[in-house]
Image: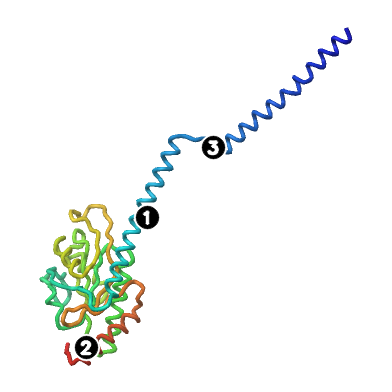
Amino acid sequence: MFTRSLLRSSTAIPRRLAQPARRHYASQGFRDKSAIGPFTWKAASLFVLTGAGLYVYFESEKSKIQERKRQESMTSSVGKPNIGGPFVLTAAPTATNPSPREFTEQDLLGKFSLIYFGFTNCPDICPEELDKMSDVVDETDKLLGKPVIQPIFISCDPARDTLPQVTSYIRDFHPRMLGLTGTYDQVKKACRSYRVYFSTPPDAKAEDDYLVDHSIFFYLMDPHGQFVDAFGKNSTAEDVTTKVMQAVERWRASGEKF
């Protein structure tokens, strides 16, 4: 009797001891699964879509940077780049010219010009560059004792930049600044003549929601309408003024008048 009871007790003990071990194994497996996290096709699809979106974004930014580098290399190459040429645009009314008028490359002749391509809805870069251009014009006027530089703003957003809009916009900058705009084809031709990149959709309407990207330069043209130099965002007003004065002195030394 005693022997049978002892045997029953001894065989029961391992079963009771084994149960916590199984529970420990199960709980450990649960923790491992939680650490790894659930894998679902939805999560995998989201990961792939996010990766594809980032790839498209970076490729787009890369192409813009390459285009701007191309512009920079073009304007800094040996010899004179082929910048400038025929165009027909419309000059917005100003205090001295209260009516819109046709403006072509022939109207650039006889004086130095600083020309910037931009758009009136530009939040920061265009105003900064036009302020810089205005400072250069004022400083050269002071150094030379007379007005020598004609500042010009050319819109590359013809759908939104109507003549009244351009007139209102240029008032915030230099009083002699001219604002030019036109049809999409006219603007495109002017941009092509000056090797300016811009991304305005050809069929855009003023009420549409679209972005405008463009080259960030302004050009110095001589009184013959020939390209002299180009200035990017990193050029200060002092840098540009120095280059303009050097160009004016070379012009004078050659016996040319303006």
Which numbered marker is on residue 251?
2
What residue do we see at 60% from left, 35% from top?
Answer: 32
What residue do we see at 18% from left, 65% from top?
Answer: 164
> Three-letter amino acid code at disc 2?
Trp
Q: Which residue is mark 1?
A: 58
Count neighbours of disc 3 (C-alpha within 10 A) and say few if under 14, some if 14 to 19, many if 20 or more.
Answer: few
Question: What is the secondary structure assignment of the residue under circle 3?
Answer: loop
Q: CA distance from mark 2 to mark 1?
A: 45 Å
Q: Which residue is mark 3?
A: 37
Q: Quadrant of the N terminus?
A: top right
Mark found first going from the N terminus, 3 or 2: 3
Residue 83, given in percent of the width and then of the height, sits at: 20, 73
Residue 180, given in percent of the width and then of the height, sits at: 18, 69
Count neighbours of disc 1 (C-alpha within 10 A) and say few if under 14, some if 14 to 19, many if 20 or more.
Answer: few
Mark found first going from the N terminus, 1 or 3: 3
Residue that lies at the very extreme toward the front in this rendered image: 78
Mark found first going from the N terminus, 2 or 1: 1
Question: What is the secondary structure assignment of the residue under circle 1?
Answer: helix
> Three-letter amino acid code at disc 3?
Gly
Quarter location, residue 102:
bottom left
